[in-house]
Image: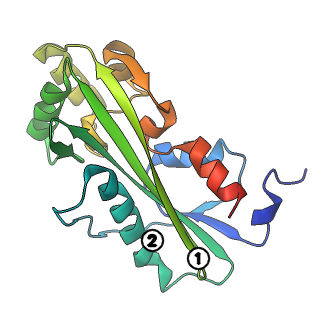
Amino acid sequence: MKSILPNLSQYKIVLGSNSPRRRELLAGLDIDFEVQTIPGIDESFPKTLRPDEVPVYIARKKAEAYVSSMLADELLITADTIVWTFGEILGKPKDREDAIAMLRKLSGRVHEVITGVCITTKEKTVSFSASSAVCFASLDDDEIVYYVDKYCPFDKAGSYGIQEWIGYVAVEAINGSFYNVMGLPVRLLYQELKKF
């Protein structure tokens, strides 16, 4: 069966990510790809950036770590997700206490999930971001501790995965893409790949 994106047939597509959610979401686009990961990429960013610029900056930084070893026919996809709430960026929690503290901040409030994506070849780089507003119900400490201890959300921005238990019980509404909150705005990515 022919590919849905014939313009990409010249490329070997590489997802530069450890995230099982991003793997699952990219696979959902019916695109053949392989996963490559480089451990220990520095994800720091200048404090002068606006929140919507941060995940794009980090996604591009991740891409730069791969460029020197990329082959001419490779197309690399990298991404980064942050949670923005009340003037603060929440990335991945450092430990259990940090995860609990983050979820307390999100409880009963609306927060923004922003994912930056970078598509890179040896000749060209395209980057973009998507934003979704998520309305969280109030959670009591027992619920927060239950989620953190059972699901260990230490690899997730804002300390939660919307596709897990907490998404079922806490998410009241979303304005924007559900998949963006999972970590990859697949509709936007598809549109960008279509015209790449």
Q: Is residue 38 above or below residue 55?
A: below
Instruction: Check the image and tell me how it is coloured.
Output: rainbow
Residue 103 placement, left or right of 179: left
Indicate the position of residue 22 as horizontal and vertical percent values: 50, 47
Does residue 93 lie above or below 43 as drawn? above
Q: Please identify the quarter of the rendering in which residue 196 is found.
A: bottom right
Q: Is residue 179 left or right of residue 8?
A: left
Q: What is the number of the mark on residue 33?
A: none
At label 1, the amino acid type is Lys
Which is closer to the viewer, label 1 or label 2?
1
* Residue nearest the observer in this picture, 150 or 20: 20
Q: Is residue 126 left or right of residue 79?
A: right
In this view of the protein, can residue 188 be seen by the observer?
Answer: yes
Task: Give the residue pinned by disc 1.
Answer: 124
Sequence-first tag of 1 and 2: 2
**Residue 68 placed where, x, y %?**
48, 86
What distance separates the C-alpha of mark 1 from that of mark 2?
A: 12 Å
Q: Residue furthest right?
A: 1
Q: Secondary structure at mark 2?
A: helix
Q: Dot 1: few (<14), some (14–19), or many (≥20) neighbours within 10 Å?
A: few
Is the residue 180 above or below the residue 100 in the image? below
Q: What is the crowding at mark 2: few (fewer than 14 residues within 10 Å), some, or many (at least 20)?
A: many
Identity, as a three-letter code, of the amino acid under mark 2: Ala
Q: Which mark is residue 63?
A: 2
Q: Which residue is rendered at x = 69% and y = 70% of the image?
A: 12
* Left or right: 24 in relation to 183: right
> In the rendering, at what x and y percent does residue 37 appear?
45, 66
Which secondary structure, mark 1? Answer: loop
**110 vs 165, nearest the viewer:** 110
Residue 175's spot in the image, x, y percent? Answer: 43, 26
Q: Is residue 32 visible?
A: no
Query: What residue is rendered at 25% in x and 24% in y?
Result: 147
